[in-house]
Amino acid sequence: MLPAVSIVDVVKRFGTLQALAGVSLDIGQGEFFGLLGPNGAGKTTLISSLAGLVRPDSGTIQVMGHDVIRDFREARRLLGVVPQELVFDPFFNVRETLRIQSGYFGIRKNDDWIDEILANLDLTGKADVNMRRLSGGMKRRVLVAQALVHKPPVIVLDEPTAGVDVELRQGLWQFIRRLNGEGHTIILTTHYLEEAEALCNRIALMKQGRVVALDTTANLMAAHPGASLEEVFVRTLQS
Amino acid sequence: MIGFLTLLEKEFLRFWKVAFQTVAAPVLTALLYLLIFGHVLDDHVQVHGVRYTSFLIPGLVMMQVLQNAFANSSSSLIQAKITGSIVFVLLPPIPYSAFFAAYVLAAVLRGMMVGLGVLLATVWFVDLKIVAPLWIMAFAMLGGGLFGALGMIAGIWSEKFDQLASFQNFLIMPLTMLSGVFYSIYTLPAFWQGVSHYNPVFYMIDGFRYGFFGVSDVAPETSLLVVVACFAVVSWGTLSLLKRGWKLRA
Ligand SMILES: Nc1ncnc2c1ncn2[C@@H]1O[C@H](COP(=O)(O)OP(=O)(O)OP(=O)(O)O)[C@@H](O)[C@H]1O
Ligand SMILES: [Mg+2]
C-alpha cells in the first residue's frame, strides 16, 4: 500500500540555520503517528513543508503518491492541517469560517458535516459567534474544525491541545481516534508525552533538524523497561 | 471553480461588512475635493470647453476607483499575513491563477462601488453627460484591475503596515495625483507634459474622461492600448510571483 506520507532527504535552511538537515520518513496509511522533539527541533518546519507553506531546499515529499510541489492541488486536497499558531479571521463567525474553508476545498453544501464537527468539538453553541469573541481554547478548536471540513485522509495536528481544557482534550482525542478508526491517517506533534504515549502507534523523535529515533511506541518503551515515554525521550535526546 | 468563487465571495464580504469605512468614506473624501476645488475654480477655469466641476468629476471617480482597488487587495493580504490567517488560503488546493483572479476581481468590485458612489453623490452638482458608457466601463475595469494587481504585489511584498504605507504614499498617490485628475496636462509646461505621458494613470483618466465628454487629450484607442499593455505586464508579473510563492511560502 502507498504510504500516506513519504518524506525523502528533506533539507531546509533559514539563512545559516539548518531547520531540516535531511529528514527521511514514511508514514503508513491509517497510522496514528507522533512527531516529537524539543522546541526548535524542526517539527513545524517539516509539517509546513508537507503542507506547501515552506519550500524545502532539496528532497521530496509526497502525500499518497502526490508530490507536494509538482502535484500540489491533489496533495493539498488530501491533507488537513491544524497550524500551531493560534490564527483566525476576525471578519467571520464560526460557521462562516467553516463554510468558507469548505468552499476553498471545492465543497459547497457542507452543513451536515460542519454540524457534526461542531458537535464533536463542543462548538455548536458558538456557531454564530464572531471569531474575535471566542476564548483561546475555542479558537484552537475552530482551527481543528477548519482542518477537517474536507474530510482529509491525512490529518496533521501541530500541538492541537496547547491551551485546551481537560474536558475538550478528552473529547478531541475521542473524535480524532474515531477518525483514525475510520481510516484517516493522523500525524500529531505535542509536548504532552502522555498523550503521545497513549495515542500514537509510532513515534519519530526529532532533534536539530534530524530524526534521532523512529520506532513503534511499544518498541521505544521496551528499550527502556519501566521508563515513561518522557524518560525515554530525555535519554534518547541526551545520548 | 468553487474555490475561486469562495475566495472572491470572502474578499467581497471582507470589505462589504465594513462598507462604511471602505466605500462610504472614500466617497465622502471625493465629495470634499469636489466642493473645495469646484468652489474655488469653477468660475475661473474651463477645460476642453467644459466647466471645471464637470471636468473634475470623472477624474475624481477614476482616482477613487484606482486607489480603492489598490487599498482592497493590499490591505487584505497584509492583514492576513500579519495575523497569520493567510494560511487558510495557502493550505487549500486553489490554483494561483484563481487566487490572482479572486483578489483582483474583488478589488475591481470595491473600486467600482466607490466610483459609482462618487458619481451618484456628485452628479447633482453639475449636468454630466455620458457620451460613451462602454469606454467608461472599460477604463474603470482595467484601471481597477491594474491597481488591484499592484495592490497584491504591494501587500505580498510588505512585511509591516508602514512599508505598505510608503508604497501607497510614494508610488500610488503621486501616480494618481499627477495624472490629470485635477487638470488637463495641456495646461502644463512642455516638460511636464512629456513626463505625464510616461504615467499610465494619465491614460486611464484621460480615456475614462473621454467616455463622459467625447473629448480627451489623446485618442481613447491609444489610451486603451496603453492600459491593456500595462495590465498584461503587471498581471503576468503578479502571476509569476504567486507561482514562485514569493514571500508567501517560505
Ligand atoms: N520562517 C522562519 N524563518 C527563520 N527561521 C525559522 C523559520 N521557521 C522556523 N525557523 C527556525 O527553524 C528551527 C525549527 O523551527 P520549528 O518551528 O520547525 O521547530 P518546532 O520543532 O516546531 O518547535 P516547537 O516545539 O517550539 O514548535 C528553529 O530554530 C526556528 O527558529
Ligand atoms: Mg512547532
Image (tube, rainbow, N blue to C red):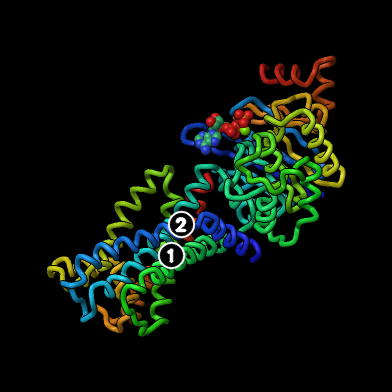
Q: Quick one: A139 or A192, which is closer to the camera?
A: A139
- Quick one: quadrant of the N terminus of chain B? bottom right
Q: What amino acid is at disc 1?
A: Val
Instruction: Work out whether residue B114 can be spotted.
Output: yes
Q: What amino acid is at disc 2?
A: Thr
Q: Tell me the SS state at disc 2.
A: helix
**Image marks 2 and 1: residues in contact by CB distance under 8 Å:** yes
Disc 2 is attached to a residue of which chain?
B
Residue at point 42%, 49% (across, down): B157
Disc 1 is attached to a residue of which chain?
B
In this view, B176 is above or below A98? below
Q: Residue A161, how many percent across, how many down?
A: 71, 32
Instruction: Work out whether residue B198 can be spotted.
Output: no
**Label annotation for residue B114:** 1
Residue matched to label 2? B22
Q: How far apart are labels 2 and 1 at the CA level?
A: 8 Å
**Label annotation for residue A107:** none
When asked about the image quadrant of residue B60, the answer is: bottom left
Q: Residues within 10 Å of mark 1 (few under 14, many from 20)?
A: many
Q: Tell me the SS state at disc 1.
A: helix
Q: Residue B236, how many percent across, how many down?
A: 44, 64
Tell whether B237 sits left or right of A85.
left
Tell whether B214 sits left or right of A70.
left
Classify mark 1 as within 8 Å of ligand 1 or not, answering yes or no. no
When asked about the image quadrant of residue B183, the answer is: bottom left
Residue at point 75%, 19% (across, down): A232
Residue at point 28%, 69% (across, down): B202
Q: Residue A103, how many percent across, how many down?
A: 67, 59
Tell whether B250 sits left or right of B143.
right
Quadrant of the rendered image holding ligand 2 = top right
